[in-house]
Image (tube, grey):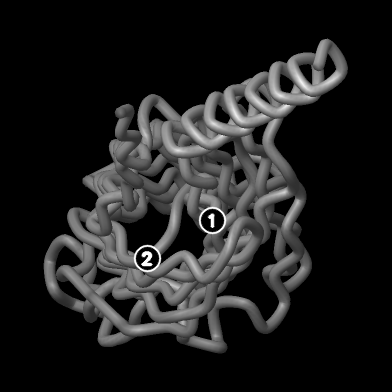
Amino acid sequence: MRSVKILIAAGAASLLSSAAFAADMAIAPPPMPYAAPVADFGGWYLRGDIGFSNQSVKNIRNTNPALYANLLSLDEKTGFDTGGVFGLGAGYQFNNWLRVDVTGQYRGNTNFHGLDLTSFPNGGATGFGSDVYNASKSEWVFLANAYVDLGTWWCVTPYIGAGVGTARVSIANFTDSGVATLFPAGSGVGPSLVSAQTGSQWNFAWALHAGLAYKVNPNMTVELGYSYLNLGDGTTGVDATFDRSAGGHVFTFKNITSQDLMLGVRWNLDSPQVYAPPLIRKG
């Protein structure tokens, strides 16, 4: 009789244990659904840039070949003042390392200063001359660019890139003040003043880019960038002497280049997707 009671007690304990385990199973949370990782940055974006230029030109020449038939340049020094650069653009980021955009820039007026020292034969004498150049220059530049992002460390992403497009170079307020002295002494001195109308031309342009991008939040990135830009040639309008007795040619600014330092902002137009936590029920 005692063994039957023990058997009944063991069976009851087993049933209670099974019921408690089933109750625990009923309130266990369901497995969390899989959520795809959210991309750091992607899709369409707008950009704005502001900076300054450091420009140079290879040389300046007049299109009148007679001026350079026997001319020997002894020294030529040229330079541009620093100018402001303002840009807007739109682009698309394909993934974490590749993005492209199109940009438009207005490059404000920069003053140009040049000095050219020359020598030339003049019959039995040797002539020496100097030309002092002054002008102002501005551009519109439109580029299609591609960039490679090189990885991200502490929200900072270094990048490199390249662009091709077109530039409209305008030269205004050009003057050439010249003095020619013939030797031996007393052979003569000939001062001159030449001015030219405003001239503009479209050129093929290309650029190389490098910089650092800092992600402020998922929709905003700040860039500090450097660009080397080749703008092609620039030309003045038709030139003339101060008394209009000679002229009819143009001055060419050969191979204008610029090294730019830019601060930019990119705005992501595609808001990152946010996944809600799974719903957990108890009881």
The residue at the point 16 percent across, 61 percent down is 242
256 or 277: nearer the viewer? 277
Residue denoted by label 1 = 34
**Kind of residue sitting beneath label 2:** Gly
**Kind of residue sitting beneath label 1:** Tyr
Mark 2 nearby-residue class (10 Å; few <14, some 14–19, many ≥20): some
59 or 131: nearer the viewer? 59
Q: Secondary structure at mark 2?
A: strand
Horizontal arrangement in the rendering, residue 156 relative to residue 251 (left or right):
right
Q: Secondary structure at mark 1?
A: loop
Q: Is residue 265 visible?
A: no
86 or 71: nearer the viewer? 86
Q: Position of residue 111 (x, y in %)?
A: 31, 39
Residue denoted by label 2 = 43
Cα separation between marks 1 and 2: 23 Å
Q: Are marks 1 and 2 in contact (CB under 8 Å)?
A: no
Q: Is residue 105 above or below residue 123?
A: above
**Split into 4 quadrants, where in the image is the N terminus?**
top right
The residue at the point 61 percent across, 56 percent down is 96
Q: Position of residue 188 (x, y in %)?
A: 51, 50
Give the residue at the far front of this rendering: 1
Q: Is residue 124 visible?
A: yes
Q: Position of residue 232 (x, y in %)?
A: 51, 74
